[in-house]
Image: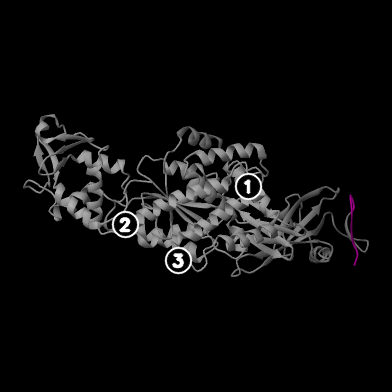
Amino acid sequence: MNFSFVPNQGLMVDERHITEFDVKVNRIFYYIEEDESKKNRMEYELVAKMFDGTELPPRRVKKLNNLSYFTLWTEIMDAGLDRWERQMLLLRLQTSCEDAKQVKMYHITSNGYQTLEVGKEIFVAGDYTYMSNQDGIQLEVDENVKQMKWKNKVRLADKKNADRKEEDYLMASPGASEILFTAVLLSAIKFVFIKAGFNPAVCINLYGKTGSYKTALTQAMMYMENPSQFMCSLVNDQKKMAVKKVQQCYGFPMILEDYHPAATGYDYKRQISMMDAVVRHIESNPQSAVVFITSEFLDGVESLQSRTLQIEAQNVDLKTLTKIQQEQTMATIVMNFLDKLLGNMKDVIETIQTQYEALSRHGEQSMRIEESIVFLKITAILYGKYVDNSDKLKLKSKLDKALTLQKEKQKLHLEQLSMSEEDRVIKVVCELVDDKDLYRRCSYKDKALYRGEANEMLVSNRGVFLSRKALVYGLKRYNCTGISVKKIILALSQMELLDEDRGGTHTTKVQNIRTYCILYYELKERYEELGDTGDIRPL
């Protein structure tokens, strides 16, 4: 049978008139599911022509029989078609399949890099899609993935402009922002490390006291349009949700926000359990996000301390921070980096493997964060090789310096945390009262001049007198994280290192001022028994 359509005559078969409209299959879509638990399916794209030859918009159907053409195109009146006419239209559709274009439509439900067919690789990260060869292939990306949108998406950044912006990110918090910047780059290119045979299970804890801009600094580094989509609250969200989100956010950074070590009982254990679950998940599931935590130092959480790179938010330059918050060029920087790597995949993978071999400490005992540091260093090397090949930014050397500083801080913190609570209190308090630059010393014979101010200490033969605000002041100046005035006073009382009045306040009155009278000579004797435990001052 030979079908033909002639305008103003209609659809014919072997010169016999069928209908006043034509319909045929234009393309056949084969939907291939990424999720193997789901069945593959196919759809037919139909095109139609009116009696005068006017083409109607294409429509897709899942099957060819029992079609209502009026439902597909209201311009077509099919109510009067008889059985033979409908059979001929079905045969017209079936025979047109032979000439229809075959299209493979891959249904993508997650971020990541994968090979669809030989020589056809794709990378999906939210609403950004890369295809090495588009011939005969189309992608249908799930809406849950596409809603992860890039901020100010630009395919290729102007290199000169990007250099200037990169420098701003590195200078926002010297000693910390170099690490944050590199870790954010790693978030986007983690798939390349996986392709090279590694799992960069990197978790960074940006710690600092309240008001140190740690959350603002972290969010300023993000390259997503809506960072809240990539965040979980350690206070308000559930562990199950956090683990699910760290999996969904593969290809992006994910933030666990506001760990509060001062919480007690269930609330404290709940936060620890959530962080631990997320870190263990990224260690066993390569296709997951790089994790950032904002908090105080992870005091007393030994399993997390050794698996989390802890960096201190310090010396934040507010002018620079405001600038990067306003200009928001991180998406441009990251996408430019991605484009360079995706165009040189074979060489990139070889570079990662070579550098890992060179940087890893094979057979040596080391902290578990050492491998995270190796992956960050390799990321900086890749950036220098494919983007900043003139080394104008000097990212690798700046990162090395920042990592050395922060690693020493972390090592010192961990050494202190390995001490008993009593020994740590003795160490902290003794070094506070021995610091001649910290407090203005007032002799007991001049006690009438003592006002109990934050920077004052009264000295007598009994011991030294400090007000509560003076202790708070000293702890802040020494940046003592994870130890509170309450812990200190309770421990000193239990060790009988306080000369205190009755009544349970652990204080004594001087000039009508409530103070803590610390028995200095007994304290000093206990301190000297500890031996050399290092300086508690921040590096």
The type of residue carrying mark 3 is Gln
Give the distance between the C-alpha atoms of the residues marked 2 and 3, in whole angstroms.
Answer: 20 Å
Describe residue 531's horizontal placement relative to residue 497 as left or right: right
Residue 101 point in image, percent of width and height:
80, 60
Among the 4 quarters of the image, the one containing residue 71: bottom right
How dense is the environment of label 2, judged by Cα within 10 Å: few (below 14), some, or many (20 and up)?
some
The magenta segment is 1-9
Mark 2 in CB contact with mark 1 (< 8 angstroms): no
In the image, is residue 6 part of the stretch drawn in magenta? yes
Residue 332 in magenta stretch: no
**Label number found at residue 365:** 3
Q: Which residue is mark 1?
A: 335
Secondary structure category for the residue under label 3: loop
Tell me the CA gap for discs 2 and 1: 41 Å
Colour setup of the view:
one colour
Q: Which residue is mark 2?
A: 417
For numbered disc 1, what is the local secondary structure? Answer: helix
Rendered-image quadrant of the N terminus: bottom right
